[in-house]
Image: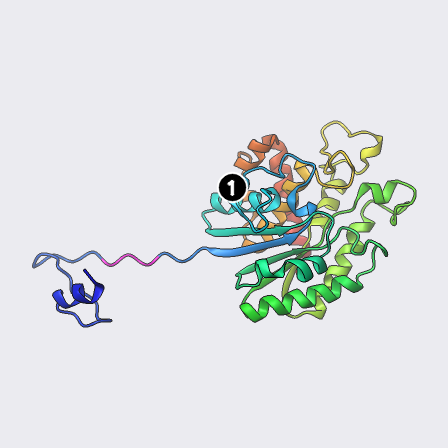
Amino acid sequence: MSGAVLLALAGCAPGQAIASTAPHGETAAPAAEPKAAPKTILFIGNSFTQGAHSAARNWRAGSVTDLNKAGYGGVPALFELFTEQAGLDYRVSLETQGGKTLGFHYDERRALFDRPWDVVVLQELSTLSRKKPGDPTHYLRDVARLTALFKARNPAVEIRLVSTWTRADQTYKPGGHWYGKPVTAMAEDLRAAADRARAANPGVAGVLPVGQAWNRAMTTGVADPNPYDGIAYGQLDLWAYDHYHASVAGTYLSALVTFGAVTGVDPTRLGPREKGADELGLSDAQATALQRVARDTLAATAR
């Protein structure tokens, strides 16, 4: 039976509320509020977003939508689980390709994601440029191109830039662009580039200070700053075996910063028994320490 017929039988014109059928003298229960649609969030990046070389890479891949159907979970899957535990409703998608720049995604993959999104997270190549490490020229161009694309589809879209971490191999090995500099230097240079991209593009809502969280973890003794001389007792190694990509702990910290910045929820509210940490092999104490680092970093770098 059509909706119009049902309304006619109820004595209502289309668009008119159906009168209460509660018995005389009784108050009808108020109509339930329609459930809000979940927020949509898209992650664009490379192996750092995927959680490559760690157990997080394919973990809970079924909980997110991989637009390339490659079966990655990584940071997006952790973000999804964090929001679920916080009582938030997000529909999480990712479009990633290892070793590629944001320019690659715009030039080669934009047909996959050229649609309205509520939130977009952009993660650039770890050295910004393969031929000229540290050079932000193409990064600035590609953030502008992607921002214009997403703003055209949804003017209210919230775009965030991921400022990634120092690579130990670029710092401690001769030939690395940041060789001989403090372990915090590469992350600070990447943050400066992200800040430039944000300043040049008013449509960018903010920078996710992942690299600053790694720096804080190392300077406060939560993580070991040099994986080449062994990992100190009681400290975490944020890098995977290649001293380049993130370990489970490093990926977890990256996801915590992303979660806190995007949702505004204090990461420590997830608590020591957070499900993702448990499933990926982090202890309650390690989860708590990384959540505190994420919280403190976000508080210190809010801008």
* Residue 47 x/y as whole percent: 69, 45
Left or right: where 163 falls relative to 134: left
Residue appearing at x 72%, y 38% in the figure:
238
* Highlighted magenta segment, given as a residue range: 30-34
Left or right, residue 271 beside residue 292: left
Q: Is residue 184 magenta?
A: no
The answer to whether any part of residue 196 appears in the image is no
Q: Residue at x 17, y 65 (%)?
A: 5
Place of residue 212 in the rendered image (x, y in percent of width and height, measured from the top left) = 72, 50
Mark 1 crowd level (few <14, some 14–19, many ≥20, 10 Å Cα): few
Q: Amino acid type of disc 1?
A: Gly
The residue shown at (87%, 40%) is 172
Q: Which image quadrant for residue 9?
A: bottom left
Q: Quadrant of the C terminus?
A: bottom right
Task: Assign the N terminus to one quadrant of the image.
Answer: bottom left
Q: Residue furthest top?
A: 233
User: Which residue is labeled 1 in the image?
Assistant: 62
Q: Position of residue 167 (x, y in %)?
A: 79, 44
The reply to whether residue 63 is in sight is yes
The residue sitting at 69% across, 46% down in the picture is 48
In the displayed structure, 233 sits above or below 53; it is above
Q: Main secondary structure of the magenta part?
A: loop
